[in-house]
Image (cartoon, coloured by chain):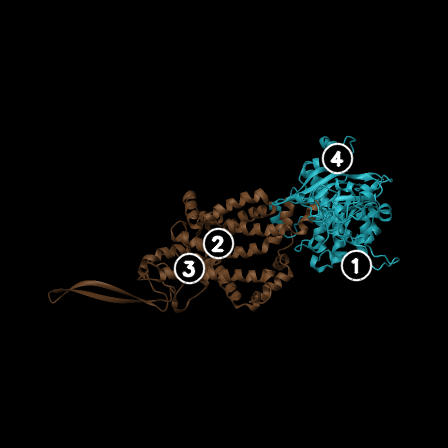
Amino acid sequence: MAPFDPRSLYEWLTDRVSPRTRRNLRSELDSSLLAKLGVGILIVVLVSAVFAPLIAPWNPTAQTLDDKQQPPLGFSRAETQVSQEMVDGEVQIVEETEYIDATVAHPLGTDALGQDMLSRVIYGARTSLLVGVLGTVLAMAIGVPIGLISGYYKGRVDDALMRIADVSLAFPSLVLAIALVGLFGQATVNVPDPFVTSGLSEFLRGLVSLPGGLSYPPGMPETFALPGTVILVVGIVNWVWFARVARGEALGVSEEEYVTASKALGGSNRYVIRRHILPNSVTPILVLATIQIAAIILLESSLSFLGFSGANLSWGFDIAAGREYQTTAWWIAAMPGLAIVITVIGVNLVGDWLRDALDPSIEGEGGGV
Amino acid sequence: MEDILRVEGLSTRFFTSDAQVNAVESVSFDVRAGEILGIVGESGSGKSVTALSLIDLVDSPGEVTAGQLWLRNPPLAESYPEAAHEDGEFVDLRELPDRTRRSLRGPTFSTIFQDPMSSFNPSLTVGEQIAEAVEVQRRASATPRSTRSRTDGYGLGSYLLDGIVPGRAYTDDASHERAVELLEQVGIPDPDERAREYPHEFSGGMLQRAMIAQALAGEPDVLIADEPTTALDVTIQAQILELLREIQADRDMSVVLITHDLGVIARMCDRVAVMYAGEIVERGTLGDVFDDPVHPYTQGLIGSIPDLDDPRPRLQPIEGNVPSLRADEMGDRGYFADRCPKAMEACLDPQTERSCDDPEHAARCVLADDAYDPATALPDDYFEEGSDD
């Protein structure tokens, strides 16, 4: 085998995308500030998720109760302690207010168990993105073939499949998800974290010296809990959207003359679907996929918030945990909430960018607005 | 010359929600080995539907409702005795299983469509698409045609792998070389380079050549050319027709050439069938039909060609319009009677095909074997609305 050459991989990758599409993607990115913002956000989230053990300052599950409920930088928290003291023979109630200041060690504060919020937010990106991407892939894998078959064969096949889709659509997705989690249980898969088990994270963290004599605390979780059931569930809940879009595309593309031409040259139905219908339906499916990633991240957070996911390092889970401290330590819920908002906006901006760049029907500046 | 295809009483109907449309009405003709048969008619006369019926590509709500399509193919006749003709040489295509019929597309029937621009998939290179046509045939000949689907071994898994694994593809190098060879044969300069281009980089004429190359990939016995030059400008038309003729002569193929252009028919065809309102109204050799037309419709068509040698001040149009093909509006009478300058009382009955003196020459018209009798002629306003009462 020839030695691996990263350039050939890049060439091969760009080969998959036509020069025109590449040009459109580039020019759309150059001209749109929002697209740049979205791509930037997504890169930050992606890097955080992948390299979490290298980036997170603390072990996100290490509890230090002495440091609990520390505020994020720029804020302080007042803790009032009420005690009774004997003064001149009378019992007096003394209120002592203690101000707890933020520390550099925990820039986003700590939660009720003294776990570092920044580290938890960084690790939470893993759960969200993994569920978002894998769930979308699963939904595509179910929905796209069903949609293509439905739109290509039309008639009774279409009717039957689309009635099933209608039934799925009629069900509120969160309720369906909860029912399915109840059915399958909360199967989480513990995936070993390669950065930690190989000792790479420990080694790299040892190299960094922080100012002020601080050192990175050692130890990171060795495994990462992948919420298997949740991925399955969001895939099953969201396939309908892909089926709908793929069907619509297939309905249109199957009327094209080259489909008839291909059949006239001996192509079977399956062959025509794969070689002609699918490649020409891919753009709207891709755009939908980005939107679905965002929707699935939200759904995952909702499920975690309600305690159905089984993942303990998840934004939704942290919001649920911070709910009781809303009045005294708002950041426990606010930080992961902010992370969700920013990520979802970022993914949507990337989706907009793809749509503008890939959809020739709205080519040109701003679709005539 | 012997027949390769005999069509007997083919009828194709479209069943829409509010009407039944009789697009093709008991059409009979035959195609002989190595000839060019022209089918000519106005728009909506059923030419294209006839062609699509031959290769079983009439889409719902259309359906072939009657007739036999006899194809000369003794091996098939042997494997499908229930579909075979008693002479053991011909099989009825309509009696064959769908899968077997599909396997005939490519090696037996190949088709060229009207608009080359829309007949290529814009997301694949031209070379790839021709190579795939080659590959489909190669795989099909590697597996027995009656038992396996032709594109078996190409499941969704293979498709996804093709997208992911570099260098893996449905087609192999041999098919690509064959594709380039085919492009060269149809006169595309620099075929190696052109094969790597996408359809939008081709001109219309070039694409039509590429489509002919694609149709030749299966080495067809019968090439169905459905208005192959309509979308092209006149100079390119001439080149494409020349190319079709050359290829036909080289390979000794049969060509069914469908067009509305009598000029194209006159220059290309050995025999002609004229269609009107879903029926073949007249058929015969080129000489019979052009020089000695029997049916007034054919006469009208030929009379409407501008003639340089005989500059009459006005061309002779055919009065009236093509009738509706809806079953509830067609009625039973000879469909052309209301436009016919020689309509007689006998024309009010449905017409069957009658042979003229020459057995090759037949017309669906009373005049084929009776002379025009002015005594029974219908008055001019006979078909006009309200004239019955």
Q: Residue furthest left?
A: A89
| Picture quadrant of residue B28 | top right
Q: Are marks 2 and 1 in contact (CB under 8 Å)?
A: no
Give how far apart the Cα atoms at labels 2 and 1 are: 57 Å
Q: Residue B306's x, y, as percent?
A: 83, 57
* Category of crowding for the residue at label 4, using alpha-carbon neighbours closer than 10 angstroms: few (below 14), some (14–19), many (at least 20): many
Name the colour assigned to chain A in the rendering. Answer: brown
Earlier in the chain: of badge 4 and badge 1, it is 4
Between residue B258 and residue A258, name the one nearer to us: B258
Q: Say above or below: A76 vs A4.
A: below
Give how far apart the Cα atoms at labels 2 and 4 are: 57 Å
Do circles 2 and 4 both sit on a common chain?
no
Residue at mark 2: A132
Colour cyan, chain? B
Residue at mark 1: B234
Tell which subunit mark 1 falls on.
B
Q: Residue A307's x, y, as percent?
A: 38, 50
Q: Residue B226's x, y, as percent?
A: 74, 49
Q: Are marks 2 and 4 in contact (CB under 8 Å)?
A: no
Q: Are marks 2 and 3 in contact (CB under 8 Å)?
A: no
Tell which subunit mark 3 falls on.
A
Residue visible at 62% across and 44% down? Answer: B155
Residue at mark 3: A121
Between residue B334 and residue A359, name the one nearer to us: B334
Do circles 1 and 3 both sit on a common chain?
no
Q: Are marks 4 and 3 in contact (CB under 8 Å)?
A: no
**Type of amino acid at the residue the image marks with label 2:** Gly
Residue at mark 4: B91
**Type of amino acid at the residue the image marks with label 4:** Val
